Image (cartoon, rainbow, N blue to C red):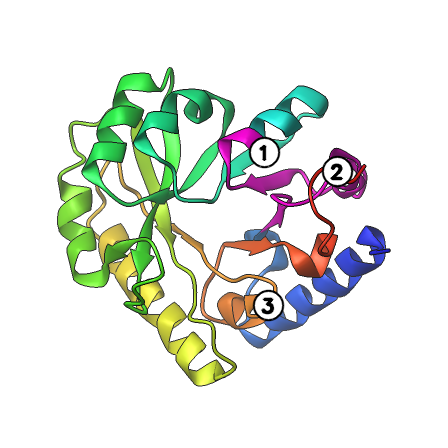
Amino acid sequence: MTNVKQNLEQIQQRMQSASNRANRKLEDITLIAVTKEVSVNRTNEVIENRVMHLGENRPEGLKKKLDAISSDVQWHYIGSLQTRKVKSVINHIKYLHSLDRMSLADEIEKRATSTKDCFVQVNVSQEESKHGLPYDEVEAFIDQLHNHEKIRVIGLMTMAPNTEDDTIIRNVFQKLKQLQSKIAAKQIVNAPCTELSMGMSGDYEIAIEEGATFIRIGTALVGKEKEGIE
């Protein structure tokens, strides 16, 4: 059985090493435990180890955890969010990592009861299988959000391509960092864009070296236990 405590210790050590290589401070990087396919019991193990940022990618999975977990955690919605599911999700989360179209922004504006911290999802690698805005459409999209008072674009999010070529992965992360810096320099009131959500179990060290401020770790932390196994 996966030992969350031991996994977390190893991850934190690797995070520290990557931070040192990049001359960064470890405290500037937030670890999100992706609990989308694991049980409530396993999720509680994560919380017991003081990881308080949790990521879900389905409304049903989020609801199950919300109903069972009373701890004061920060919920991240990291999956593609259907417009018709916004109502059931948006007021239960702190962060949305998958803002990628105007219809979704409009529905968030309509349903949110407070301002939500959002990452614009960018398909840097241009893979058809991935969600996200094309790289060259991101700035215009953010400019169009100026009347959406319930949305604060705190940063950009991407997923690296499924490859073992570190050079390709690094290039994707570097491109997102460049775009984030360009948008941040505009000093847009509702889009400070200071954050970068990138890096998963297989590539979070590269992501940290290239400027990630939020990393999303599932399998390396919680294993492959499927939801429903208590």
User: Which one is in front, 39 or 44?
Assistant: 39
Residue that sits furthest to the top in the current view: 113
Separation of residues labelled 2 and 1 (CA atoms): 17 Å
Is residue 99 toward the left or the right of residue 187 in the image? right
Specify which label sits upstream in the sequence, 2 or 1.
Answer: 2
Compared with 170, 111 (above or below) is: above
Which residue does the image show at 43% across and 76% down from the upper left? Answer: 170
Is residue 169 toward the left or the right of residue 45 in the image? left
User: Which one is in front, 82 or 118?
Assistant: 82
Specify which label sits upstream in the sequence, 3 or 1.
Answer: 3
Q: Which residue is mark 3?
A: 19
Q: Nearer the viewer, mark 3 or mark 2?
A: 2
Q: Quadrant of the N terminus?
A: bottom right
Is 40 included in the stretch rendered in magenta?
Answer: yes
Q: The residue under label 2 is which amino acid type?
A: Ile
Separation of residues labelled 3 and 2 (CA atoms): 24 Å
Give the x, y percent position of residue 158. Answer: 39, 58
Magenta residues, start to end: 31-60
Q: The residue under label 1 is which amino acid type?
A: Gly
Which residue does the image show at 13% across and 49% down from the upper left? Answer: 140
Is residue 60 toward the left or the right of residue 230 in the image? left
Which residue does the image show at 59% across and 68% down from the upper left? Answer: 19
- Say which mark, if any, is on residue 47: 2
Q: Which residue is mark 1?
A: 61
Q: Is residue 29 visible?
A: no
Q: The residue under label 3 is which amino acid type?
A: Ser
